[in-house]
Amino acid sequence: MRQIKTFSDSRLDTQCAYCGEFPDTRDHVPSKILLEKPFPENLPVVPSCLRCNNGFSLDEEYFACLIECLIFGTTDLEKLSRESIVKILKRKSKLKTRLDNAFTTENGESFFKIESDRIENVILKLAYGHVKFENSARQYDKPEHIGFVPIESLSEEEQNSFFEITELQKSPEIGSRAMQNLYITQDGTPIDNWITVQEGIYQYSVTPTIGNLKVRILIWNYLACEVVW
């Protein structure tokens, strides 16, 4: 990722990106568990309180392991690809059993019974973090919509809509990363853009418009996520 020094109001960094409390530490967004080694330089980092920094860890582990199992359609460790995920599942037998029990077959079709609340918790955390990192100002409200689906389940029209480059109707915080990274078309129209954290593994977009704020995330070219305020 391109390194950008922000010049926004320093007082905006006195709150945790997730809960608003005083930040004791800093947190990578996305968490490294969602990426692959070697990790990219200049990973997004936001201020975080210690409680939030630690509080998402178990759900993030579940989330990362679930995605790997969903991609390969199995919990068989020998058939999974990511070494880091295999190590987690070998070390954490309860998590492995939990995923084993979630993998069921009905009428000849196999599928996972996912824990939607845990998935939404991680996606919301990621969205809050991306908003803070790009716009400097944190998002205070709960979103109106949290959605996630395998990208391959979307029609061509739906995929085009998901990746659509949108005209910005609202300016980002002055001095923020988003303001400095703003794309302007030849006719002077400001538009959003996708930020690639790791090619083929993690990318996101933060789009402020009048009346709403939208974060889109694509993880491992598999899970398409959208959060709208």
Image (cartoon, rainbow, N blue to C red):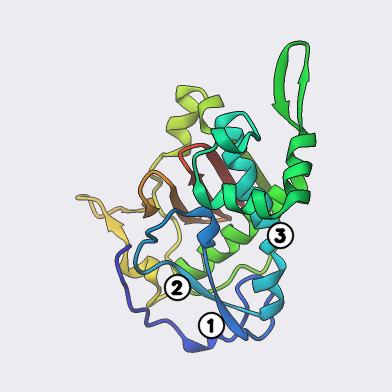
Q: Disc 2 vs disc 1: which is toward the camera?
A: 1
* Residue to which mark 1 is pinned: 12
Q: Disc 2 vs disc 3: which is toward the camera?
A: 3
Query: How far apart in space, not on screen, are marks 1 and 3 (Cα)?
Result: 28 Å
Element at label 1 = helix
Q: Is residue 192 visible?
A: no
Tally the marks: 3
Choose between 1 and 74: the one closer to the eye: 74
Residue 17 picture location, percent across and down: 60, 73
Identify the amino acid type marked 2.
Answer: Glu
Residue 163 picture location, percent across and down: 42, 39
| Circles 2 and 1: CB atoms closer than 8 Å | yes
Quadrant that contains the N terminus: bottom left
Q: Earlier in the sequence, mark 2 or mark 3?
A: 3
Query: How far apart in space, not on screen, are marks 2 and 3 (Cα)?
Result: 33 Å
Which image quadrant for residue 67?
Answer: top right
Choose between 98 and 16: the one closer to the eye: 98
Q: Earlier in the sequence, mark 1 or mark 3?
A: 1
Asked if residue 127 is positioned above or below residue 165 in the image, the reply reads below
Element at label 3 = helix
Element at label 2 = loop
Q: Is residue 110 left or right of residue 17?
A: right
Choose between 2 and 40: the one closer to the eye: 40
* Residue to which mark 3 is pinned: 58
Identify the amino acid type marked 1.
Answer: Leu
| Circles 1 and 3: CB atoms closer than 8 Å | no
Quadrant that contains the C terminus: bottom right
Asked if residue 110 is positioned above or below residue 165 in the image, the reply reads above
